[in-house]
Amino acid sequence: MRVFRSGLRKLVRRPASWVSLGLLLALLALVFLAVGASARQLESQEGSGNALLLVTFPDAYELVLGFILGLGGLLALLYAAAIAGSEWTWGTLKSAVARGEGRSTYMIGTFASVAVVVGVALLVAYGFGLVAAVLGATLAGVSTAGLNDSATLGSLPEALARAWVALIEQAAIGFAVATITRSQIAGIGVGIALYFGEQFGGLFIGDIVKWFPFNAANAAVVFGPTVSSNGQAVPTLEPNIALLVVVAWLAGALVVASLITERAEISG
């Protein structure tokens, strides 16, 4: 618990925590307010109905969460990679071990603090995104009657919980990669390559890639029909199966990070 509390205090002061959240909030505001402000232009264009769904409730509840999961997953990966990499490049892990902290205990405690920060960021971003969607709907002249949809509101706690697990799984991948490379820059670079490589691979080997961490994370929070890309159906896992796969990737990433830390040479 000492490592966890210390980690939280450090993360609150880290610029990366605020920059990552600020970037996500700015993009949410840009997307949802821009759709509302450009509603008149959209009305005359083909496919405008799909765009206005972003600010139409109750659909907006799911779309805001989907947007956060899509962009926030990459930000969580980069954020966790930066935190784990700094433990090596800044020498804080070495100092902790010198004080008698267990290596695995320290790294798991550090990741636990990252997971809490990601969870708080999810709640803040989701609340902010809903406000942006309501403002966008007002600008577009779209009714907000669906805000009180009881079925959607009843499913929100489970949806947010699934989204949090999906986000921290992606964060764990970045955390493990940075631990393996022992570098912030390498961890971020390799993490980005893995993220976009998986998306690209889905175009050719979708039946295999759907079991990979980022695709599984998205599938775990999908409520509607199979997602389509460029008019082609993309193979996805059933949400409950995807959630189990996500938990497996999360646990595996933390085990790898712990084993690497335990066997690494950090003296000197």
Image (cartoon, helix red, strand yellow):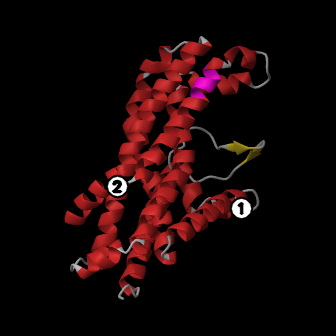
Cα gap from disc 1 to disc 2, whole angstroms: 34 Å
Q: In what element is the residue under mark 1?
A: helix
* Up/down of 91 relative to 14, above or below: below
- Residue 164, how many percent across, how many down? 41, 49
Q: Residue 40 carries which label?
A: none
Pointer 2 local density, CA inside 10 Å: few below 14, some 14–19, many at least 20: some
Residue 112 falls in image quadrant: bottom left
Decide if residue 156 is in sight here. yes
Q: Which amino acid does label 2 sit on?
A: Leu
Q: Which amino acid does label 1 sit on?
A: Gly
**Residue occupying image coordinates x 47% and y 62%:** 82
Name the foreground residue: 81 vs 16: 16
Name the foreground residue: 244 vs 110: 110
- Residue 68, how many percent across, how many down? 52, 41
Q: What stretch is highlighted in magenta?
A: 32-36
* Up/down of 206 relative to 149, above or below: below
Residue beneath disc 1: 201
**Residue occupying image coordinates x 42% and y 46%:** 18
Q: Which of marks 1 and 2 is nearer the N terminus?
A: 2
Q: Is residue 248 left or right of residue 66?
A: left
Secondary structure mainly formed by the magenta segment: helix
Q: In this view, does 5 lie to the left or right of 66?
A: left
Q: In this view, does 172 lie to the left or right of 216?
A: left
Q: Is residue 35 magenta?
A: yes
Pointer 1 local density, CA inside 10 Å: few below 14, some 14–19, many at least 20: few
Residue beneath disc 2: 11
Q: In which quarter of the image is the N terminus?
A: bottom left
Q: Nearer the viewer, mark 1 or mark 2?
A: 2
**Residue occupying image coordinates x 29% and y 55%:** 8
